[in-house]
Amino acid sequence: MSELKIRLLVMLTAAWRRRYAIVIPILVMPIIAYAVGAMTPPKYKSHTSMLIQETAKMNPFLEDIAVSTMLKERLSALKTLLNSRHVLLSVASDLNLINDSMSPYEQDQVIARISSNLTVSQLGKDFIKIEHSASSPDGMKALLESVSVHFIEELLAPERSSIRDSSEFLTIHIEKRKQALEQAEQALAEYYNAHSAATPEMQSENLSRLAKLKQKLAEKQAELAGIEKSLGTLDQQLSKTNPIVGRLEEQIIEIRSELTLLKAKYTTSHSAVQAKLRELQRLEQERSVLLSSEQTGLDSDQLWDIASAAGTGSSSREFQPLLITQLQNLQIVRGRYESLKQETSSLESMIAELTANAKNYGSNAKQLLRLQRDVTLKRELYDELVERYEMAELTGSLGIFEQNKRVKVIDLPTLPAVQPICHLLFLRYWGSLQESRLGLAPRYFSSYLIRPFVVANSSKTPNYRLSQLFPKSVSRFAILHVISRNGMQPFLTLCFKEQ
C-alpha cells in the first residue's frame, strides 16, 4: 500500500514539474485548430454514380452479335481520357467557363482546376462513381452532368465508332470484291464461249464417243477386209470366164438332150445317133482345148456386155445364165465394199479429230480449273464480306435499340453539401501532440519518477544510466511495462548494484 502511495506521489510530482507542457497544448491547440479551420475555405463535394449494363450479353440469342464495353480493361484509359484536355475543353465550353477571348494560359488553368477536382472510381464490376469537389457549389451540378455525358460518350464511343467504321470498311471492300468477282466470272464465261467443247462434261462425252468410234471402226475394218477378200475372189473368177466355153457347154447340153431322145427311138448304130455322138465329141474336144489353153482375163464391163448379148438371144429368153447371176453378186459385193470403205474413211477422220482435241485436254483443263478456282475464291470472299456486313448492321441496330439501356444512372448530380476539412487539421495536430507526448513519456519516468525515489531512499548514486543498463533495441515502453508489473524495487536494485 505504501509502495502505491509512493508511486502516485512520484507521478503527481512529475506531472506538476511538467504542468506547462501538459496544459498549454491542451488549451492552445484547439484554438489553433479552430483558427486554421476558420481560415480554410469550405470544400463542397458532389457525385454521380452509374451502372454499366450489358443486357445483350445476358441474352444467349444476342450474345454473339453484342459488343462489350470492356469496362475493367479500359477503366484506366477512361480515367486518363476524362482528365484529358480535349474532353475537359468540351466540358468547359459547354458551361461557358472559357471563351475565345481567354488566353491559352487561362484556359489551361481552368482545365487544370477541373481536372484536379474530378475523380473516377469503380465501386463494383459494372458500377462507376464520378466525384467532383470545389470551393463553391455554383455550377457543380451542371459541370458534373456535362462530365457524365462526356464520360458516357467516351465509354460507348469505341462501340459506335467500331460499328460505323466496320460498316464503311466493309462497304468499300464489298464493292471491290464485287468488281473482282464480276471480272472473274466474265473471264470464265468468255473461256466457255471460246472453248465450249473443252468443258469436263464435253471432254468426258468426247472420250466416250471416241471409244465407241474406235470400236465401230474396228468392226467396219474387219468387215471391209472380208468383203475385199471375197470381192477379189469373185472378180478373179469372173475375169477368167471364157464365153466360148460357156457357149460350147450350152451346145453340149443341148446335144446330150437330143441324144437321149434319139436313143429312146433308135438304136446306137442308127445314123442319127452316130451323128449326134460325133458332134458331142467334137464339142467336148473343143472345150478341152479351150480350157487347157491360157486366156486373157476380161474385165467386168466386157463380161456385162457378153451377158447382155447372151440374154437377148431368143433361145434363152426364159433362161438366166450363170454369168449374169455372178455379175450381179459381184456388183452387190462391190457396192458393199465401197460403202464400207467410205464409212471407214469417215470414222478415221472423226477419230483423228477427237484424238487431236483430246490431246489439248490437259492445258484446257488447267486453264479452266484456274478460272473456276479464281471465281470460287472471290465468290467466297464476297459472300463472307457480305455476311460480315449484315452482322455489323445487325450489331449497329442492336446498339441503337439498347443505347438508352446501356447506362443506368443511379445517383443523379445534386446540389453539394459542405464538408468541412478543419477536423482533419485538428486531428493532425492532435496526433502530433500525442506522438510527442508519448515519445517524451519514458524520459519523464526515467528522469523525474525514478530520480526522486532514489534520492529519498539512498544517498548513493547509480552506477549506470538507464541507457547503459539496457541495449538500444529495448524500448522505454518495455522498461515501463516491467516496472509496472514487478514494482520499483527490482529495478532500483539493478540500478544500485555494486560493481
Image (cartoon, rainbow, N blue to C red):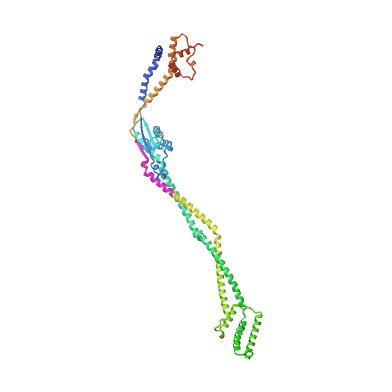
Residue in the image at 60% along x and 72% along y: 229
Place residue 33 in its image quadrant: top left
| Magenta part, dominant SS | helix
Residue 42 locus on image (x, y percent): 35, 28
State whether residue 6 is above or below residue 393: above
Pick the residue in front: 375 or 115: 375
Tell me if I can see residue 356 in this picture.
Answer: yes
Q: Is residue 259 left or right of residue 449?
A: right
Q: Is residue 99 visible?
A: no
Callout count: 0
Residue sitting nearer the eye, 487 or 16? 487
Quarter of the image where the N terminus is located: top left
The image position of residue 45, as x and y in percent, is: 36, 31
Residue at the spot x=44%, y=9% of the render?
457
Q: Is 226 above or below relative to 497?
A: below
Q: Residue at the bottom extreme?
A: 271
Span of residues in magenta: 387-412
**96 displayed left or right of 359:** left
Q: Is residue 391 magenta?
A: yes
